[in-house]
Amino acid sequence: MAENKKVVITLVKSPIGGKENQKATLKALGLNKMHASVKKYETETIKGMINAVRHLVKVEDK
């Protein structure tokens, strides 16, 4: 099994006025406040979640 790399996900745009599923995705990622960052392993599940809210977050390699 290949080692998964970590990514840093930062909320850079407010989800106010957005769709409920996008708000739920941000909550599941652990992003509750503006400019908050979380470190996650880059799995297929996390990639899909990032893709769903790609216009609200900034993703950087760790």
Image (cartoon, grey):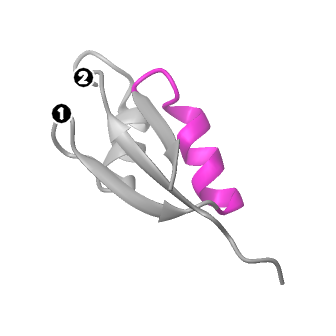
Per the rendering, the mark at residue 14 is 2
Image coords of residue 57 (percent x, y):
41, 31
Please give the residue where the numbered disc 1 appears in the rendered image: 34
Per the rendering, the mark at residue 17 is none
Image coords of residue 7 (percent x, y):
52, 54
Query: Where 45 sits versus 15, above or below?
Result: below
* Mark positioned earlier in the residue sequence (1 or 2): 2
Residue found at x 44% / y 32%: 58
User: Is 47 displayed left or right of 33 in the figure?
Assistant: right
Image coords of residue 47 (percent x, y):
64, 49
Residue found at x 66% / y 63%: 43
Q: Nearer the viewer, residue 17 or 59?
A: 59
Residue found at x 72% / y 77%: 3
Q: Which residues are magenta?
A: 43-56
Tell me how far mark 1 sits from mark 2, CA to CA: 7 Å
Residue found at x 64% / y 59%: 45
Q: Are marks 1 and 2 in contact (CB under 8 Å)?
A: yes
User: Is 39 displayed left or right of 50 in the figure?
Assistant: left
Which amino acid, by three-letter code, is at mark 1? Answer: Met
Which amino acid, by three-letter code, is at mark 2? Answer: Ser
Q: Farthest residue in the right direction? A: 1
Q: Farthest residue in the top direction? A: 17
